[in-house]
Each structure stands twice: as C-alpha cells, then as structure tokens.
Amino acid sequence: MSGDGLRRGRAVASALVLVLAVLAALVGVNPTFSVFAATVVNSGNSAGTATYFTCGAAATTDKTALFAYPLNEASGATTAVDISGNGANGAYQGKMTSQGVRPIACPRDAGGAYVLDGSSSYVATPNVYNNPRTFTLEVWFKTTTAGGMLMGFGDKRTGLSGQHDRKLYMTPSGQLIFGIYSPGTPDPTITSPKSYADGAWHLATATLSPSTGIRLYVDGSLVASNPAATNPEPYSGYWRIGYDKLTAWPDASSNFFFTGSMRAAAVYGVVLSADQVRSHYVAGK
C-alpha cells in the first residue's frame, strides 16, 4: 500500500474512534464496558419453590429415615443401597431387573426402576426392630397386575413370616389396604376408595402412631384413616418390601408377591405430617 493510502486509513480509523467517543459521552456510557443485561425467567419451573427437588433429598434431609432405598441399581444387582446414612443396605431377592422407560417416578434421581417379577423378586432389610409403634412407610409403585404386598413387617428376614402385620398391600381389584393386627380384636384396616392398578406411577404412604392411629395417603393426599387403630402386634421383626405372607388379611390376593415397578422405598421412625407427605409426592413428579 502507498504512503498516501496508509495515511488515509489512519485518518479514517481516528475519525471512527472520535465518533464513538463522542457518542459514548452523549449517552453517558463508558466505552470499555458492555451496556447489555439479561434476565432469565422460567415461569414453569417450580424447583425454586419446592421443598425437595429429588426423592433422595426428600428421604434424607430431615434425618428420620430408618432406611431409604432408591431402588435404582442396575439389573443383576444384589444390594439395595441405603442412602439414609444408617448403613442399612437391603438385599435383592430372586430376579433383579432394572428399566428406565420414561416417564418414571422420581425423574430427577439417577438410575432406573426396580422391576418385580411377581414370583421371586423382593427386598430383604437387615435390621431387627422391636415392636415399632410410630413410623411412616412410603414407596413409589406402578403396576397393571393387581395384588401382592408393597411393604410390611414380619418376624422373618426372608421367606414367609410367622408373625406379620403393619401391612400395605394391593387387593385383586387394585385398591390399597393398610392395617395392623391387634390380638383379640378384629384386624383394624383401612382401604383406598380407588384402584391403582392402572399402569401409572403412584406414591403410597402409610403412618401409625399411638396418638394418630393409622393413615393412608396416595399421591400426597389422605384417602383413609382410623384413629382408633393404635396397637399393633408386639414382636420383633424386619421391614419387608415386595413380598410376605398375606394369609387371612382382608381381600388379599393369593399371590403374595407384588408384580410391577418400584422406586424410592423408605421407612421413617416418625409420623410424617400431611405437608411432608405432599412434599415427598411433589419431589417425585
């Protein structure tokens, strides 16, 4: 480029710098800083207002869980990992299959769902508890095959228990029943009005205490209660998930195994409030 061309280019550049400086002075902006700002709004995201964002957080935040199993291990796993901090790992019995077909309960938690085959699959828990009279049990489940036990208490860790109560199970019509066995009196049980063998994910929650009796929640809402049912059978035993004896329990199916999928099974040593139950349901949606 000739000397004249270089001089003309420098003159143009100097003029542009001068114009920009003048414009910046007119609008009161420092030319070395950006004048842009952005605000991101997602009116459909409720995470900021939810008590818990995941089922794992719901089960472990308040430190009252005796055990909490995400039930999200890969197919073939033998250990149901306890995330409560108590080290109460469970043991998968029979066939253990996992699948991650969406939609799924607890969609923000890692892993898939535990698929119970209805003939061999269940979870054995490790610890013996002496006559639990105050507790909450909860589990996410999905099925189109009505019947079988979701969760309960029995005197055997595996196989069929001799003493068994504190039962949450499904009837052949798909309704849920929760109840206790009080020796010498009719078995106090409560039943959901609706059937839940509909192929959708549901959260079942059941509570017992001497002051509140028994309560049954489904999908965060109270569906049945009996404040007079306060005295379960006094014995030491294990919490059971997916299978145990249902002989002589009202409207129980002949197959004691649950058939379907599960996620996030837990037992707490306290009665969760209605607000807590609702928050746990929201965490799994």
Image (cartoon, rainbow, N blue to C red):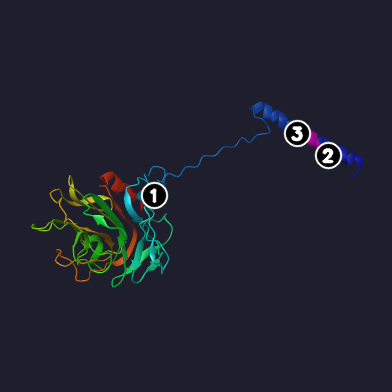
Q: Secondary structure at mark 2?
A: helix
**Residue positioned 83% across, 37% down in the render:** 10
Residues in magenta, as a range: 12-17
Residue type at the position of mark 3? Val
Mark 3 — residue?
A: 17
Q: Is residue 13 magenta?
A: yes
In this orientation, which residue lies closer to the viewer: 61 or 176? 61
Query: In the rendered image, which quarter is residue 82 located in?
Result: bottom left
Position of the N terminus, as image quadrant, is top right
Q: Is residue 211 magenta?
A: no
Mark 1 — residue?
A: 57
Choose mark 2 or mark 1, whichever is in front: 1
Label at residue 94: none
Q: Determine whether 184 is above or below 248 in the image.
A: above
Mark 2 — residue?
A: 9
Query: In the rendered image, which quarter is residue 73 located in?
Result: bottom left
- Separation of disc 2 and disc 3 at Cα? 13 Å
* Among numbered discs 2 and 1, the one appearing first in the sequence: 2
- Number of residues whose C-alpha sits closer than 10 Å to that of mark 3, classed few (under 14), some (14–19) or many (20 or more): few
- Which residue sits furthest bottom? 119
**Residue 282 percent location from the top left of the image:** 34, 50
For the residues labelled 2 and 1, say whether their Cβ atoms are less than 8 Å apart.
no
**Residue 61 percent location from the top left of the image:** 37, 46
In this orientation, which residue lies closer to the viewer: 89 or 209? 89
In this orientation, which residue lies closer to the viewer: 198 or 7? 198
Residue type at the position of mark 1? Ala
